[in-house]
Amino acid sequence: MQRASSSLLFCIILITLFTGNLRVLSSDTEVKNMKHKSADSDIKKHHNRLKLEKSPYLLQHADNPVDWYAWGPEAFEKAIKENKPIFLSIGYSTCHWCHVMAHESFEDPEVARLMNDVFICIKVDREERPDIDNIYMRVCQMMTGSGGWPLTILMTPDKKPFFAGTYIPRESQHGRLGMMDLVPRIKEVWDTQHDEILKSADKITASLNQIAHDASGPELDKSTLKTAYDQLTGRYSEQYGGFGNAPKFPSPQNLLFLLRYWQSTNDEKALRMVVKTLQSMQNGGIYDHVGFGFHRYSTDSHWLVPHFEKMLYDQAMLAMAYTEAYQATGINEFEETAKEIFTYVLRDMTDKEGGFYSAEDADSEGVEGKFYVWTEDEIRQTLKGDEADLIINVYSIDKIGNFRDEASGENTGANILHLNKSLTEIAFKNKESVDGLKESVEAARQKLFAVRNKRVHPHKDDKILTDWNGLMIAALAKGAQAFDEPKYAEAAKRAADFILTGMRREDGRILHRYRDGHTAILANVDDYAFLIWGLLELYETVFDVDYLQTALDLNSEMIKYFWDEKDGGFYFTAEDAEELIVRQKEIYDGAIPSGNSVAVSNLFRLSRITANTDFEDKANKIMLAFSKDVESAPSGYTQMMVALGFGIGPSYEIVIVGNPEADDTKEMLSSLGKHFIPYKVILLKHDDQETADITKIAEYTEYHSSFDGKATAYVCLDFACKMPVTNTEEMLKLLNVSSSSN
């Protein structure tokens, strides 16, 4: 993502203009002179323009004394008219350090006076406007070598950046320039070195455009998969699982890739890495053992102390990882964890309309993690006698606690519940019944949950985003298949139906965000790609042809509005979306997969379903468009590696012909869902020709019929078809799956 020479140039510019002297103003005169200019409108409690917005993040700042604007023409016109730089602050409602910076600076009248005098100040919710966030986060990474939120960008009135950073404290400390010194310094440089700033901004913008169109390279192949595997192996922690050092992120795409690599190569180490990582995470403090669901990441290397926010996309991707790992291994704990994630989402993160909320905060009552941690005394007040002793022993709870104060580093007496060993291991060690131990722990957990539920809950970001909902739909559909659980399928259907009916413009175009009865923001490529993914999984769960047809329609729409005819790949924004300083194409698989990576998998699947090779050609062109970046570090693009594996094969096309209500048809379909067969498409054709709507999409199925009134499976492997079979076990043999393997 970075170019070394450009990064060096920008760092030099940054240092020269702003931190070269790291100068604290020599006297208070300059600050005082700036203060008095707005003193006549002494800032009182008021509502700024953000009060009119729907974003929970923007609404959190509606009472700030900072004169915030939402991103829009009004702000930029004012900046041009007054020749002021723009202070762009990007974050999200459940971001802990966003809260810290807001409290220290944006709620402070003194800082606000300085900002209002020098800047036109703009707030952006990164989850509502990922197009803006993607551009300026890349700028931050280019200029500083890192990124994160809150994201702080200073730019010219024409949106060109010249300064980038993340969290900025109120006062300068430990070599980090604070707002009280930074703002006057920016004003000085803006007034005295204006031309230099404009030139710097032009160079940064030019480099950004160059990067956006300079990614094509050699064709990706099996060797790319091997390199990705080797790179992950090199970063893998044998002791704790996961990849890299603290802070440690779940990175479920890595696990999805490794499962497929194991299946195609029989490399047992790939599977061991998946199993160890999933077990360590589900045992660790990163998992909420009382209310379920995963926190965002671990601040340490062994998954104990989390950053406590919970994101919908993490639940979706991790649910997929645990579900597929269960399909591959049959390990019961993986099934339990996947189901518990779904329990959390359906209980706490589901809107009455059917869509899924975005996130829950790390903080409650202004304290990170307060909602989730327990003292030993609290445990003993909630549980009595042996039951309390059991939970204290199982979850390693003590008087000292394991949760330290962030500022002092001292133990607080609070405990993050975690397992040093799984319940199965504890039961075996103590020579007791596994089921009995699990029942006892579950009974105690329910009591803890009831007490915890009376605490002040963290803030919930209740906006519904199309892209993240698409991921959750896909996860629930996978869960419904693997665990034969109709309620997961029903929840996936309700969410899909809500988006397809309630989150569209009058002309039918998909919109990105819904909140409080209001839809807005033209969909980006992630919205399309992830929703198509969800619909494909949903079709293979309920076999409603309408979902498959809608996936095809949305795919055509995505090609129409996002496809780059010249260089290949999908732009992040539609051709008729707001024009920004660069029209980017995203490929990096970070906290969530990139739209392009998911689109490649979708296109391969649609190609196999429809026998339309144009889809496969598009998929190959996407991979070629980004191959330079991918080839340089394929472990950073593991969702793309998942897609590449589908293209390389082997892959299966399976057509089941039969009565959907008949037991033999249900048995065949159920068996396919229970096994790990990642590179496949499944079509269901009703044996009544007159109702066989699937033939309109997959014309080749016209000639598929059932034998002797029995459910019949047609299996093709890498474009070569086998003889049809009417027995589930025979079908599984054709798929190289044993009927007893799971």
Image (spheres, helix red, strand yellow):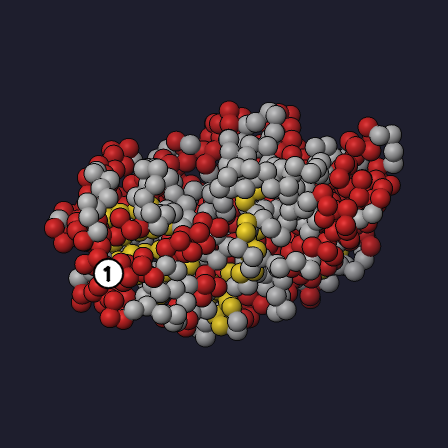
Q: Can residue 22 be seen in this view?
A: yes
Disc 1 target residue: 35
Looking at this view, is 13 or 513 the one in front?
13
Q: Is residue 234 above or below residue 561?
A: above
* Residue 238 relative to residue 522: left or right: right
* Residue 117 relative to residue 695: left or right: left
Residue type highlighted by circle 1: Lys
Q: Is mark 1 on a helix, strand or loop?
A: helix
Residue at 35 percent across and 50 percent down: it is 170
Provide residue 198's location: percent of width, then percent of height.
Answer: 16, 51
Provide residue 711's location: percent of width, then percent of height.
Answer: 77, 52
Q: Is residue 375 above or below residue 114?
A: above
Looking at this view, is 240 or 576 the one in front?
240
Place residue 57 in its image quadrant.
bottom left
* Residue 429 relative to residue 348: left or right: right
Looking at this view, is 551 or 52 the one in front?
52
Provide residue 121's location: percent of width, then percent of height.
Answer: 30, 61
